[in-house]
Amino acid sequence: MARNRASARLSVLLRHLGCPSAGTIIAHHTSGVGSLASFHPQQFQYTRENNVLSLEQRKFYEENGFLVIKNLVSDADIQRFRNEFERICREEVKPLGLSVMRDVTIAKSEYVPSEKVVSKVQDFQEDEELFRYCTLPEILKYVECFTGPNIMAMHTMLINKPPDSGKKTSRHPLHQDLHYFPFRPSNSIVCAWTAMEHIDRNNGCLVVLPGTHKGPLKPHDYPQWEGGVNIMFHGIQDYDKNNARVHLVMEKGDTVFFHPLLIHGSGRNKSQGFRKAISCHFADANCHYIDVEGTSQENIAKEVVNMISKKHGFKDITLKDVWTFRGRVAKGERINL
């Protein structure tokens, strides 16, 4: 019965997007403004009143927890982000606080500065060129529909998914981003994730479980994968295997906005090239920090604090300290975060 419901849900989703094959969504144009006069504001939990999203788009995000906007970021901007990423990989620039990460299968002895050994850079809020992504008017126009006018860029990443070594370590386990965030409310947080090239199942596109943003935050931990798991790649330990899965096929510049409770991940990169995407998690500046001690988030909190303390030699640093440093105003004013 559950499988039938999941199949029916997926069929409705694919019909809505005009998708050619089951289980795959090709990013399509979703612009346009529709009248919201027939809808009462209380019927919308996950979006705010705005004149950007059409009624259809708002209803789609409310129901599914994600929304793809086609061709949102220009080729010129993406090339600039690519150039800056390559400069970082060559260690020509070293922005304050930036974390440069490599795949678990690359031994320290093999590390030579180049984009071929860097799987991700995160916390680029002090790199003025990459942080431009977080202030692009075309991105913030949509972000404001979920966060309101005072917008904080809280977590920044440029992902360079490497060709899989054969150990399947280029996969990212299914997870909910809220697991990493010690601030709330979750409905005032949204991720913008932009493809920097054509992305499909062959090079490890995003896979989402529509509607799971309506559920609770689930316990996460490292999956027991034989080939190893990359640092901080926590995954959900128990989820409904019958839930519909949708693979997001995207072109360069396409951007998906999604809720922090949406269960998602990505498959391994079976191509010979690197798959790049740039993203930022934005939050309403009115959000507030919470104490995660004694909750399912305590494990990641300890891991983050220990990693930052070891890397920078800090003593008595708190999780709030870490996120206060990571956060930067993207629009409006800084309030609580």
Image: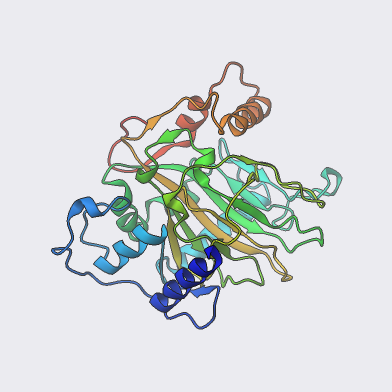
Image location of residue 23, percent across then percent down: 55, 73
Picture quadrant where residue 201 is located: bottom right
Image location of residue 13, percent across then percent down: 43, 71
- Horizontal side of 41 relative to 290 (left or right) equals left
* Residue in front for this viewpoint, 331 or 229: 229
Can you name the residue that lies furthest to the top here? 316
Image location of residue 252, percent across then percent down: 51, 70
**Residue 327 visible somewhere in the drawing:** yes
Quadrant of image for the C terminus: top left
Disc count in the image? 0
**323 w.r.t. 207: above or below:** above
Can you name the residue that lies furthest to the front here? 1
Name the colour scheme.
Answer: rainbow
* Residue in front for this viewpoint, 318 or 292: 292
Residue found at x 75% / y 55%: 169
Image location of residue 274, percent across then percent down: 67, 64
- Horizontal side of 33 relative to 330 (left or right) equals left
Can you name the residue that lies furthest to the bottom here? 20
**Residue 54 visible somewhere in the drawing:** no
* Residue in front for this viewpoint, 255 or 20: 20
**215 w.r.t. 170: above or below:** above
Can you name the residue that lies furthest to the left here? 37
* Residue in front for this viewpoint, 128 or 191: 191
